[in-house]
Image (spheres, rainbow, N blue to C red):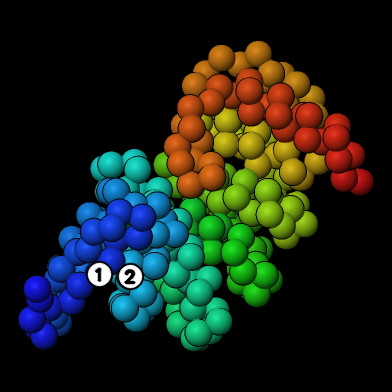
């Protein structure tokens, strides 16, 4: 039994609930979020957090994208993407503010590194045609050596995942990123090779074919966040799938 000063949140699929004192402060909200992310799917977390205003969730989720637990980090990315896409329908101005906050984290002037920011941008855009129209070119620019290129390898991984997330949903919006992929497909870092191969498949660009062919026997292993779970893949597996996709659907001219 809870008193009027407590907030009881259901945990979808578990039959349990989580009781928090009300009002819930920022620190308490982050604790709640991390606990939910540790044991619930992103969709279930969004349902459980429905009593909270979306704008309250953005900051804590951004913080949790820096979590040392990869599962927590990636589910925070997915939840934040869902939250921002939901804001498009409930409060468009807030959605734009949320996207600009992510962009600010990638700005040198922010003083931070911006872990998870490209991924959250890509996930939100993959869920919203409107956000795609407004921000896809900015995402592409993060992979452009003559644009807003992100130098940190960790952020480059995030950009490539975001481009891949977009490419598998709205390839036309990020097709210009294809001309920036050769350098990543030949990178020393196997994660960059694998993620760029994953992004290249739906773009179906003939110019990338030979580079993908060169990777089909690459045995390097990396973790790919796909279908809201981390999956262990080899670079070669992903390159073969990219080539098969292009063959099946035809090259983009």
The disc at residue 247 is: none
**126 on left or right of 223:** right
Q: Position of residue 251 (x, y in %)?
A: 88, 40
- Please give the name of the residue rendered at 73% of the width and 38% of the height, measured from the top-left corner: 201
Q: In the rendered image, which residue does mark 1 sit on?
A: 9
Tell me the CA gap for discs 1 and 2: 7 Å
Q: Nearer the viewer, mark 1 or mark 2?
A: 1
238 and 20: which one is in front? 20
Is residue 131 something that shows in the picture? yes
Which quadrant is the N terminus positioned in? bottom left
Which label's residue is closer to the chain start, 1 or 2? Answer: 1
At horizontal 76% and vertical 45% (from top left) the residue drawn is 203
Circle 1 sits in a helix, a strand or a loop, which is it?
strand
Return the x and y of residue 164 as percentages of the image width and height.
Answer: 62, 46
Discs 1, 2 touching: Cβ within 8 Å: yes
Looking at this view, is 86 or 17 the one in front?
Answer: 17
């Amino acid at each position: 039994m809870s008193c009027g000063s407590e907030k009881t949140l259901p945990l979808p699929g578990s039959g349990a609930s989580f009781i928090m004192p009300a009002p819930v402060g920022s620190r308490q909200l982050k604790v709640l979020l991390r606990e939910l992310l540790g044991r619930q799917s992103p969709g279930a977390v969004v349902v459980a957090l429905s009593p909270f205003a979306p704008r309250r969730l953005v900051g804590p989720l951004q913080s949790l994208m820096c979590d040392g637990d990869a599962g927590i980090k990636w589910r925070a990315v997915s939840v934040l993407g869902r939250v921002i896409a939901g804001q498009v329908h409930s409060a468009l101005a807030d959605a734009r503010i949320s996207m600009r906050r992510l962009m600010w984290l990638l700005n040198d002037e922010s003083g931070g590194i911006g872990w998870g920011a490209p991924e959250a941008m890509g996930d939100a855009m993959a869920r919203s045609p409107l956000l795609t129209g407004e921000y896809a070119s900015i995402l592409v620019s993060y992979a452009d050596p003559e644009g807003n290129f992100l130098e940190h390898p960790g952020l480059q991984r995030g950009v490539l995942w975001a481009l891949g997330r977009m490419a598998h949903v709205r390839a036309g919006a990020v097709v210009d990123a294809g001309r920036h992929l050769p350098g990543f497909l030949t990178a020393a870092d196997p994660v960059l090779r694998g993620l760029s191969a994953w992004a290249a498949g739906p773009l179906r660009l003939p110019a990338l074919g030979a580079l993908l062919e060169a990777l089909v026997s690459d045995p390097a292993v990396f973790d790919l966040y796909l279908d809201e779970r981390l999956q262990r893949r080899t670079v070669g597996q992903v390159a073969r799938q990219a080539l098969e996709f292009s063959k099946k659907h035809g090259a983009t001219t």
